């Protein structure tokens, strides 16, 4: 019997977070459309950010996938220079990513100590 991999579940949560962020970033296009228009560099930047967030889901299983996702998150936080709506989305999701990374660290620590419930011997 194989033991479950908790990091596989983490990759799913990362993908879900990226998709949710892409949806919210696409909603920021409504703000850009009202202020400067979709055909401006702000509109293209927000659209490109949403595309990159979705495309990153394909790479979360790679060893560098987490670094790519965090780099996009840092760029989203700098989105205040594009439009304040994008910067606000970046900061809000940065808090979510911070919590997620803390939870990942905790699981890795428990895994190394052998304290995960999946690592305990079966009781009969």
Image (spheres, rainbow, N blue to C red):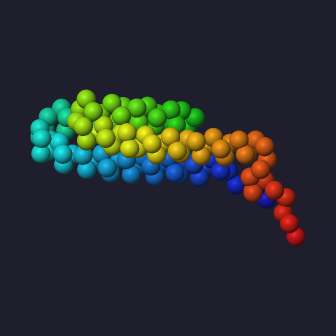
Q: Foreground: 83 or 45?
A: 83
Identified at 25% across, 29% down, the residue is 81
Question: Residue 41: where, in percent of width, then height?
Answer: 18, 32
Question: Residue 21: where, in percent of width, then height?
Answer: 37, 47
Residue placed furthest toward the right: 124
**Position of 47 relative to 116 (above/below):** above
Q: Quadrant of the C terminus?
A: bottom right
Direction from residue 6 to residue 111 in the image, left or right:
right
Direction from residue 99 to residue 1 in the image, left or right:
right
Identified at 50% across, 40% down, the residue is 98
Residue 58 visible within the image: no
Direction from residue 33 to residue 45 in the image, left or right:
right
Q: Foreground: 77 or 62?
A: 77
Residue placed furthest toward the bottom: 124
Identified at 79% across, 47% down, the residue is 114
Residue 8 visible within the image: yes
Q: Quadrant of the N terminus?
A: bottom right
Residue 120 image-quadrant placement: bottom right
Identified at 27% across, 48% down, the residue is 26
Question: Residue 8: where, in percent of width, then height?
Answer: 61, 49
Question: Residue 54: where, in percent of width, then height?
Answer: 38, 45
Residue 118 image-quadrant placement: bottom right
Q: In this figure, what is the number of numbered marks?
A: 0
Q: Foreground: 112 or 69?
A: 112
């Amino acid at each position: 019997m194989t033991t479950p991999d908790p990091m596989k579940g983490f990759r799913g949560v990362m993908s879900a977070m990226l998709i949710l962020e892409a949806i919210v970033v696409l909603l920021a296009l409504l703000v850009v459309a009202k202020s400067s228009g979709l055909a401006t560099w702000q509109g293209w930047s927000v659209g490109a950010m949403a595309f990159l967030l979705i495309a990153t889901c394909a790479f979360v299983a790679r060893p560098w996938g987490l670094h790519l996702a965090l780099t996009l998150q840092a760029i989203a936080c700098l989105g205040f220079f594009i439009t304040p709506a994008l910067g606000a989305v970046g900061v809000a999701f940065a808090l979510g990513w911070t919590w997620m990374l803390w939870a990942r660290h905790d699981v890795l620590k428990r895994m190394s100590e052998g304290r995960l419930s999946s690592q305990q011997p079966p009781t009969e």
